[in-house]
Image (tube, rainbow, N blue to C red):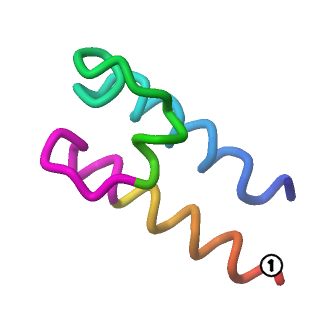
Amino acid sequence: MAKSCKGLAEELVKCLSESMCVKEEKRSIRDCAGEKSPCIPSECVGLRETYFNCKRGQT
């Protein structure tokens, strides 16, 4: 992973690990990252979009 997106990835993992999707539904971070569910906070959704755009910009 390129260093420029690494910080975003770490923030996204932290955000998702604190979400209801991971804590209450006991799902993996990877599963929750792909979800469009109301149990994912809007902050995490924004981080996910920013991270994906960062990765897309590197190709």
Label 1: state its secondary structure.
loop
**Main secondary structure of the magenta stretch:** loop
Q: Is residue 8 left or right of residue 46?
A: right
Kind of residue indicated by mark 1: Gln
Q: Quadrant of residue 36?
A: bottom left
Image spot of residue 11 (x, y percent): 53, 39
Magenta stretch: includes residue 47? no
Q: Left or right: 50 with respect to 25?
A: right
Closer to the camera, 43 or 37? 37
- 10 Å neighbourhood of mark 1: few (<14), some, or many (≥20)? few
Residue position for label 1:
58
Q: Residue at x 53, y 34 (%)?
A: 13
Q: Is residue 24 left or right of residue 53?
A: left
Residue depicted at 20% across the width and 51% down the height = 37
Task: Locate the C terminus by quadrant.
Answer: bottom right
x and y percentages locating residue 14 in the rendered image: 48, 28
How many marks do you count on the picture? 1
State yes or no: residue 44 in magenta.
yes
Residue occupying image coordinates x 57% and y 62%:
51
Residue bounds of the magenta highlight? 35-45
Q: Measured along the vertical axis of the image, is residue 7 above or below residue 1?
A: above
Whether residue 10 is situated above or below residue 47 in the rendered picture: above
Q: Nearer the viewer, residue 34 or 12?
A: 34
Residue drawn at the location 28% of the way across and 49% of the way down: 43
In the picture shown, does residue 4 fall above or below 58? above
